[in-house]
Amino acid sequence: MAVLAKIRQRSLFLIIVIALALFSFVLADLIKSGGLGRNANNVGSVNGEDISYQDFRVMVDNVNKSMGGNNSSSIFAVNYVWNQQVREKIVNNLTDNLGLSLSPEQLLERLKQDPSIGQNQLFLNENGEFDEAKLTQFLASEMATNSAQWNGWKKYEQQVEQKELEKMYFNLISSGIRATSNEGKLKYKLDNDKVSFQYVVYPFSTIADTTITVSDQEITAYINKHKDDYEADASRDIKFIFVEEKPSTADIEAVNQRIQKIMNGHEVFEDGKTIAKPAFKDVPAEQIAEFVNTNSDIKFDSSYVAKDKLPAAHQEQLFNLSKDTVYGPYELDGYSYITRKLNQKEGGQVKSSHILVSYVGAQNAKPEITRTKEEAKAKAEELLAKVKKDPSSFTTTAVTESDGPSASKGGDLGFAASGAMVPPYDTFIFNNPVGTLGVVETDFGFHVVKVTDKQQAVQLATIGLRIETSEETSNQLFNDISNFEMKANEGAFDTIAKQMNYDVKEAKKLKNLDETLPDVGNQREIVRWVFNEETDLNDIKKFNLPKGYIIAQLTNITEEGLQSVEDAKDKVKPLIIKEKKTAQAKALMIGDFEALKKVEGIKTGTATNVSVASPYIPSGGREPKVVAHALALEKDKTSSIIDGDSGIYMIKVISKEEAIDLPDYTSYTNKIKNERGNITESLYKTLEKKADISDNRHLFY
């Protein structure tokens, strides 16, 4: 009891202790997961400036939408927005430090260059000229009544300003890069001065690669000596099997049996009696639509179809069927089909062209359209008279006069089946022969129409049954794949796969923002799994896909830093071999020029009229260092040992031919200026490399 009394007396103390313990436990977990870190809500940072995840996500969504969808698994939009944000922050930091800014007048001039602003009818005066007052009035109205549009406009202004400041910065850099006339003269001389020389060379090819050994320790030492060239991003290797969920032979056979019954007729037991269902070919024409819709996974389509619109693999058979004859069954795109020919007629498909003359108030009329309905009709009649007088002018007239989207194609609308066009237009082209010209009025305006061609077409009734994976097949696949997963966790992945007849695929050097795997496409979830801190080497996991399963195993982990010996070996080993060959060759190149000619393995030759612009030596290939030495030597002088690209050289100059002086070297000076002026991207890459960039994208996507 005394103990209980003491506990009661100290209950507040105990509660505080317990609360602190719980808090420290939660705090530790938050710190471990980054919950209270500065990066918890940031996709990254550039030179200490954070990139908010909330803002970043909105921009990614907007890019996805602009691409025609909202594919949240796509890394393309993520990378696009990231690169855009990094560039913006790097350049903004530079322009801010330099005090660069854009005046309101400069910003307005830049905005006017956008056709949607500078040529917008809303902002033009009666003379068709841009009116700043109209733009100002419009923006004032948007600010007062439409906050969303106003905020969008402010963001657009910021984007324009940022691009202009970036352009201004790089223009300043480019304008400060110059080339002197002396540099122009030097370039001319280097390109056109020529030299001829004799040479002795000990080719590296004389020493077989197989005679030189390169140890892992030597590769490691080379990597450490050239660290900048062998930096490695974090990467992962995996092996995996992909098992597609698809219909079994039994599933396909079941669908075939169903479609055979529909095609040939069958009996069913309904309402206590046996009822005979007719064969597809015997169904009365007036009941075809109902029969198809009752028995098919694809609804009845009464359209007439031209031959070239039929499935290529069955085109001839379908088009040439006799009336009421049934073709099939045939498989196509996951369906089993039977098709009955109902009818055939000339002109079932019509090709036409048009010149649309729109007016204010017409459907889809462009903002710049100002003509009235009466004016549009008069213009259409005028254009009709023109093309009737000269039918060959229809295409060019459509390009220059049509208000429709087909103007760029000369008004060509291609072939269409009956009912595909708006009723007045449809009636005209199907009721008139090829070559007919006329004016048709629709809700879009007045159309100057030309009937250009007609095709024979067929009317078909097609029953299609989807070939689907049955529940039994799906269950069996799940059992098989689960069995593989269990066995692979207990034994060798490759061995178990071979026993169960699964193909093992590999994906090497996966980066933390990759999203595709060989042969199976976008699998971002798997990439995120292999980079999860809780995923260990050799871990195995099953992933459910819309069309099957993947079981993956993490087989290698490479952390950020220097490349491993294994990864760098293919690149480093040849370089070390060349270093060793150079040392061996130099050890043999002892003596003067004439003496070296007699050394075993030495080759001799003559290079004639070579230059810096064309530094090619017979049998040696491209040797710019050797040619540069030759141009620097006087006639009849001999060089010291030269480390060439293909061997170790010594040369003796025979003759030199200096290019004649030019009265002016401006063209060569300009070449240097152009070469130096195109530095925008290389300069930005340097700035990006030196920037302090923290990238957390892989934690969010």
Image: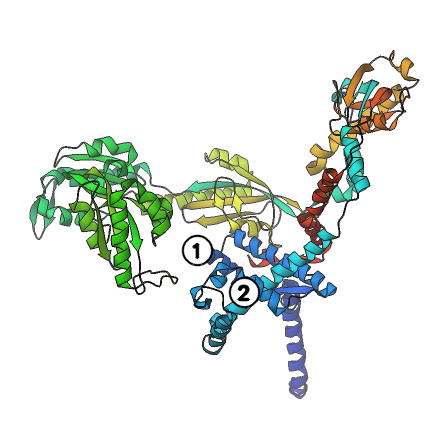
Q: Is residue 215 above or below residue 562?
A: above
Is 491 situated left or right of 481 in this image?
Answer: right
Colouring used for the render: rainbow
Picture coordinates of residue 395, whole percent (x, y): 33, 43
Residue 444 shows in this picture: no
Secondary structure of residue under mark 1: loop
Q: Which residue is mark 2?
A: 156
**Figure quadrant of the C terminus:** bottom right
Toward the viewer: 76 or 179? Answer: 179
- Could you classify mark 1 by the number of other residues whose Cα lies within 10 Å: few (under 14), some (14-19), or many (20 or more)? few
Quote the CA–CA distance across marks 1 and 2.
22 Å
Q: Kindly identify the residue that appears in the image at 44 percent across and 48 percent down.
A: 545
Instruction: Please rate how many residues cluster around mark 2, counting C-alpha atoms within 10 Å: few if below 14, some from 14 to 19, many from 20.
Output: few
Question: Mark 1 and 2 residues: CB-CB less than 8 Å, in contact?
Answer: no
- Asked if residue 684 lies left or right of residue 664, the reply is left
User: Horizontally, is 261 left or right of 637 in the view?
Assistant: left
Residue 526, x across and y down, in percent: 53, 49
Residue 69's label in the rendered image is 1
Residue at left offset 9%, top offset 47%: 286
Can residue 123 be seen here? The reply is yes
- Examine the rendered structure and indicate whether residue 583 appears above or below residue 450: above
Looking at the image, the residue that sits furthest to the left is 273
Q: Compare residues 658 and 521 and report the one nearer the observer.
A: 658
Q: Which type of secondary structure does the marked residue at label 2 adopt?
A: helix
Per the rendering, the mark at residue 701 is none
Residue 637 appears in which quarter of the rendering? top right
Residue type at the position of mark 2: Tyr
| Residue 558 percent coordinates (x, y) | 67, 45
Say which amino acid is labelled 1: Gly
Asked whether 623 or 387 is in front, the reply is 387
